């Protein structure tokens, strides 16, 4: 597999979306929503076809992926010669401009004969430079990723830069923050549809912390226009980025002119953390250029009023390695009384959580900041 838009016949390239291991299904669902078809998925990586001109859209609108990369080449690399030759003859000139500043951003090597990361990075950069016929590195940054597993190499070119999880609104966090892309993935997996203004279901997060889940829910369909992306400065994409950002700004303007009937509420027993959530909401409203329909309140989940209409309760429950959760989990079934007609999507690392809250319809195990946890789904 080598760079080239399906041998330059259909204009499609191999694109890889990175995500937390275990949440590949959420990325696949989001890609399907946008009309893309996943053809392969592995731990934390989702492969699909797209045009180069789609890359600005994917970076601005995708909420479940951590970054979007172009798959330059897949090849066997048991020796440094194989690594060098495969990279050197990978037609990088089709995408990378002559004066590019080459950065080897990430190396992920597992169970392979080539294991010395410093030497691999050095050989990789030399091969890239030779593939371009040399570069004075006076131009924009091109950041490369190499995944090497069982002697099989994937050479990728990152188009995002800073992780897409860094939306720009979360300047402060609670003790146990949930990454934005993980929050968006859980919302996506819940099939919560907040896209319509009429009869939208209600979303509640009774352990909202710094507000990530409610804010992500309110912005799930909004493009992140204000963020700076590494590929904006590439010669091959500069004009596409300009046009795409202009269209995205029109989308934001049209959406901001429509009054929202959505019910999105977050609450937490910690009043100081609710102040942080409110500040993050203020910043998010500025970034997304619209008043976001989110309400935060300082309230113990045991004191929540009963909500009898259809609702989605999505929450990252407090747990022992991060927070003292003993009394919370003991009383957690109270949520069923507070929301008798709700679907529940609850995060907790203990596989025995079902003994307390009941058997889940489905559960997914994934990595949350290096800690394996479960999403328990009740619907």
Image: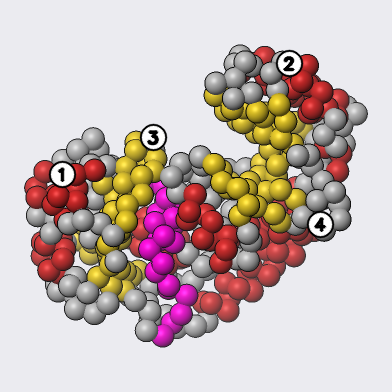
Residue 50, numbered label: none
The residue where tag 2 is placed is 80
Disc 1, disc 2: CB below 8 Å? Answer: no
Q: Residue 174 vs residue 150: left or right? A: left
Helix, strand or loop status at disc 3: loop
In primary-sequence order, the first of circles 4 and 2 is: 4
Q: Is residue 160 visible?
A: no
Q: Position of residue 19 (x, y in %)?
A: 51, 45
- Determine which quarter of the picture holds residue 366: top left
Residue behind mark 3: 370
Gap between marks 1 and 4 measured at Cα: 52 Å
- The image shows residue 107, relative to residue 361, as above or below, that is above
* Left or right: where 274 falls relative to 90: left
Q: Which mark is residue 11?
A: 4
**In this view, which residue lies farthest toward the right?**
133
Residue 195 in the image: state x and y as whole percent: 47, 75
Q: Which residues are magenta?
A: 178-198
Residue picked out by circle 1:
325
Residue at x 68%, y 38% (from the top left corner): 156
Q: Quadrant of the N terminus?
A: top right
Q: Is residue 203 above or below residue 105?
A: below
CB contact under 8 Å: marks 4 and 2 = no
Instruction: Tell me which label, 1 or 2, sits earlier in the chain.
Output: 2
Nearer to me, 293 or 83: 83
């Amino acid at each position: 597999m080598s760079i080239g838009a399906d041998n330059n016949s259909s204009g499609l390239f191999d694109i890889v979306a990175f995500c937390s291991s275990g949440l590949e299904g959420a990325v696949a669902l989001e890609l399907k929503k946008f009309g893309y078809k996943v053809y392969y998925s592995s731990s934390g990586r989702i492969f699909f076809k797209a045009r180069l001109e789609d890359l600005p859209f994917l970076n601005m609108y995708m909420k479940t992926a951590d970054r979007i990369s172009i798959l330059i080449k897949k090849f066997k690399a048991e020796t440094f010669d194989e690594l060098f030759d495969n990279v050197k003859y990978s037609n990088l000139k089709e995408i990378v401009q002559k004066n590019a500043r080459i950065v080897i951003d990430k190396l992920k090597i597992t169970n392979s004969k080539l294991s010395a990361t410093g030497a691999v990075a050095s050989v990789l950069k030399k091969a890239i430079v030779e593939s371009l016929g040399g570069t004075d590195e006076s131009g924009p940054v091109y950041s490369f990723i190499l995944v090497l597993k069982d002697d099989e190499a994937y050479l990728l070119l990152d188009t995002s830069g800073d992780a897409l999880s860094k939306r720009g609104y979360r300047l402060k966090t609670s003790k146990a923050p949930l990454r934005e892309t993980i929050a968006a993935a859980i919302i996506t997996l819940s099939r919560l549809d907040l896209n319509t203004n009429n009869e939208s279901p209600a979303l509640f997060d009774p352990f909202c912390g710094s507000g990530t889940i409610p804010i992500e829910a309110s912005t799930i369909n909004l493009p992140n226009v204000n963020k700076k992306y590494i590929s904006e400065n590439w010669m091959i994409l500069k004009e596409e980025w300009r046009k795409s950002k202009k269209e995205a700004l029109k989308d934001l303007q049209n959406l901001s002119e429509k009054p929202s009937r959505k019910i999105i509420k977050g609450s937490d027993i910690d009043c100081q953390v609710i102040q942080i959530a409110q500040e993050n909401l203020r910043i998010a409203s500025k970034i997304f250029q619209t008043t976001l329909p989110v309400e935060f309140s300082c309230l113990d989940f045991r004191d929540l009023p009963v909500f009898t209409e259809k609702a989605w309760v999505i929450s990252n429950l407090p747990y022992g390695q991060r927070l003292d959760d003993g009394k919370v989990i003991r009383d957690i079934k109270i949520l069923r009384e507070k929301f008798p007609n709700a679907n529940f999507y609850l995060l907790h690392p203990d596989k025995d959580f079902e003994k307390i809250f009941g058997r889940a319809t489905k559960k997914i195990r994934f990595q949350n900041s290096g800690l394996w946890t479960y999403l328990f789904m009740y619907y």
